[in-house]
Amino acid sequence: LELKCRMLEDNIGKSDKKVSEAQNLAEEREEKLLATKEDLNAAKESLVDKEEKMRTLLAQISCLESKVAELEIACDEETFKASQSQDIIASQVHELKLSKEKEEQLSNEIDTIRQKLNDSFANFKSKDSIAETRK
């Protein structure tokens, strides 16, 4: 009986030791789980911060895209106005060339009329002088 008691006591001691080791192991795992949980919470907070920053950046990008679209429209309008101005200038240059050509034509016609008048006057003088000589 004594032997059985000692064996039981030994078994109880071994069991107590195993229970103690299991408790220590469980405590270590619990500490690791707590540390992992804290890491996950920190990562979650970081992710929330990054999401907020991303939303802010997306809003800024959207605003910039709107401004770019406005600037493109304004640029297109200015390009159109410049094109119209170029067309007007080209038209005015063409009209000026036509006016110059018309001026040259009129000048030539005036010169021709002057020449004809001079010829007529010379012809008249010559006829007048012939008529005077006949008298």
Image (cartoon, rainbow, N blue to C red):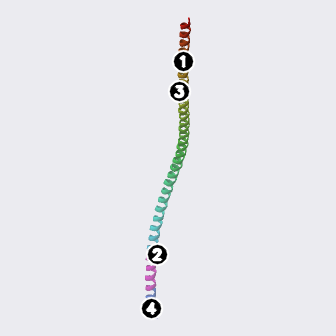
Q: What residue type is labelled 2?
A: Ala
Check disc 4: other Cα within 10 Å, few if <14, some if 14-19, many if 20+.
few
Q: Residue at x 53, y 28 (%)?
A: 100
Kind of residue sitting beneath label 1: Asp
Identify the residue position indicated by label 4 in the image: 7
Sequence-first disc among 2 and 4: 4
Give whichever of 42, 123 is nearer the camera.
Answer: 123
**Distance Cα–Cα, label 3 vs label 1:** 22 Å
For disc 2, the marked residue is: 26
Q: What element carries label 2?
A: helix
Q: Say few, some or many: other residues with alpha carbon within 10 Å of mark 2 (under 14 / 14 to 19 / 20 or more).
A: few
Circle 1 residue? 119
- Residue placed furthest toward the top: 135
How far across and down, in percent of the image, does residue 90 sit?
A: 54, 35
Q: Nearer the viewer, residue 68 or 21?
A: 68
Spatial separation of the CA atoms under disc 4 and disc 1:
161 Å
Cα distance between the residues tagged 1 and 2: 135 Å
Taking the spot 53% from the left edge, 20% from the top edge, the residue there is 115
Residue type highlighted by circle 3? Glu
Residue that carries the numbered disc 3 in the rendered image: 104
